[in-house]
Amino acid sequence: MQKPISTIVVLGAGSAGLLAALTLKKKLPAMVTVRILRSPRIGIIGVGEGTTPNFPSFLFDYLKLDQERFFREVHPVWKRGIHFIWGPRGEFPYAFGNHYSVSDTGFSRSNGFYSWEKPYESGFIGRLMQQRKVFLPDENNQPRIDDSYGFHLENPRLVAWLEGEAKRAGVTITDAEITDAARDGEHITHLTLEDGGTVQADFYVDASGFRSELLRGILEEPFESFADSLICDRAVVGGWERQEGDPIQPFTTAETMPAGWSWRIDHRHHVNRGYVYSSAFTSDEEAERVFRERNPLVKQTRVVPFISGHYRRSWVGNVCAVGNSAGFVEPMEATALMVLCMELRALAASLLEGRLEVRQTLADLYNRFSASVWEEIRSFLMIHYKFNTLMDTPFWKHCHELPLSPDAARMVTFYQENGPSSFAHDMLLPRASQFGIEGWWALLVGQRVPWKNQPVSPQERQRWAERQLRLERAVQMSLTTEQALAIVDDPAYWQAAATSQVA
Ligand SMILES: Cc1cc2nc3c(=O)[nH]c(=O)nc-3n(C[C@H](O)[C@H](O)[C@H](O)COP(=O)(O)OP(=O)(O)OC[C@H]3O[C@@H](n4cnc5c(N)ncnc54)[C@H](O)[C@@H]3O)c2cc1C
């Protein structure tokens, strides 16, 4: 009989390693020790600043971390969606929450059918984004924080806070560089440190970033590259201090660029920008020149190379890789932290289900789940490229000609025949889909991909216009990010929240 896991070593202390250690320490029985090894010389990648809504829910509902401390130490800003400067309309929103696939009372079809001309008007969060507002106030003029938001986070602050939380939970952190490891088939038996010492554990989490020291380096797991469908492979990154009077935008911006696209992420005191591009279509020098031309306030820049794809299996023997060491795609939809949360929930649940034994059937299931998550992301990102006709450069011409994956093609065909319908959600998408039908319809309606004509009656059109007036009134009274932050930064806000929870 197999010995249950009682010692876990996590290799790496970027956001992936720290969150993995925290999750396993909090979710597995207390007798399991969790130790992090990290190399200060190698350091962390230091990018990764936008999240999806599953991230706050992972931190506060699943891990039950302290929200007040998070706000005080990390200084997050809320993200209500992505503002795309993209496609034949020039711009459109991907608003979090229900935007297209729900039907408001009194309408015969889902909201997407009435939003063809004005996609921002489909739902309340789109309207908020359009007017740079973030939350409706409640009766006490406090932000009514629903669950349809992600965060903009400064990576070093996030990592410092996670380190404190991990230590508080009982994780030990050791500065040590791994230079080698010994394996017996698909099991790692020990790690070798730079000083010649060894470290042994029952289970290893490889969170060593793009180096993927254990999964790729020692276990030699093959890599499934997405380079034939997602052709960007580098980013030039920079930013500047926020200027007086420049409002904090409650969304990430994704903007079409000659050989790729560019993000803008707003933090409280500075703005972070990056140009993601394909090295087959532009050079580092030209990308930097265009990036600076568009963003004259940018100070220092750096180029970050990356490879899109994932390892065929991320859990092999007694090693599970998470974060960038398991897979990565360009940050268009802020998927890295999103996937990490999904991976960690599944890993903790699998180890608990297996009574802390490494069971092949559970590892197989985990790997199938993880591969299907990556496959959906690849398909979803492909439609961003296929239908964006805003620029006609060689890069974009090439993207338009790339064939869609079978999953993406199936979604597009369904939409072309049936419109942005809420029907068949579970039948069309994988159960674990994080974008859901909302994400797909946001990108297809947003990029003006037509569906079979299904006219809207004049009566419904009139009712839709009346609905817009109601939404407009609600947006007018809503709070800006600056107003909402001023409330949440006041300790009285958290005291009142704690009191209302006790009551
Ligand atoms: C251009 C770009 C933009 C991105 N934007 C986003 C975004 O908006 N949203 C998002 O969710 N994600 C984004 N990401 C992904 C982001 O990198 C990850 O979300 C996140 O930072 C996780 O990194 P990590 O912990 O896997 O790796 P890293 O931060 O690289 O950490 C690796 C750790 O392993 C340690 N290590 C490595 N080798 C050894 C060794 N031999 N011995 C000991 N220790 C070792 C290192 O010291 C470090 O502690 C972006 C990525 C790129 C490239």
Image (tube, helix red, strand yellow):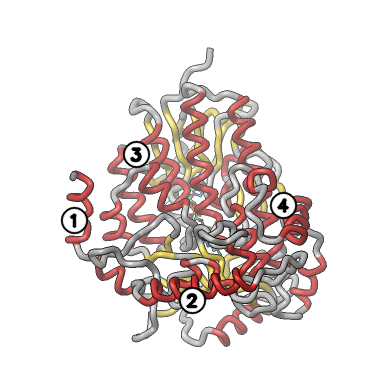
What amino acid type should be assigned to the residue bearing mark 4? Ser
| Front of the two marks 1 and 3 | 1
Percent across and percent down for residue 6 are: 41, 25
In space, the residues marked 1 and 3 are separated at their CA atoms by: 32 Å
Circle 1 Cα neighbour tier, 10 Å, few/some/many (<14 / 14–19 / ≥20):
few
| Front of the two marks 4 and 1 | 1
In space, the residues marked 3 and 4 are separated at their CA atoms by: 34 Å
Percent across and percent down for residue 136 are: 35, 67
Residue where numbered disc 2 is placed: 130
Residue where numbered disc 4 is placed: 225
Q: Secondary structure at mark 2?
A: helix
Q: Earlier in the sequence, mark 4 or mark 2?
A: 2
Q: Secondary structure at mark 4?
A: strand
Q: Is residue 408 left or right of residue 99?
A: right
The total number of labels drawn is 4
| Front of the two marks 2 and 3 | 2
In space, the residues marked 4 and 1 are separated at their CA atoms by: 50 Å
Residue 131 visible in the picture:
yes
Residue where numbered disc 1 is placed: 496
Circle 2 Cα neighbour tier, 10 Å, few/some/many (<14 / 14–19 / ≥20):
some
What amino acid type should be assigned to the residue bearing mark 2? Gln
Residue 262 visible in the picture:
no
Quadrant of the rendered image containing residue 472: bottom left
Q: Earlier in the sequence, mark 3 or mark 4?
A: 3
What amino acid type should be assigned to the residue bearing mark 3? Val
Q: Are marks 2 and 3 in contact (CB under 8 Å)?
A: no
Q: Residue 47 got which mark?
A: none
Percent across and percent down for residue 119 are: 59, 72
Q: Earlier in the sequence, mark 4 or mark 1?
A: 4
Q: Are marks 3 and 4 in contact (CB under 8 Å)?
A: no
Which residue is painted at 68% across and 43% down in the image? 427
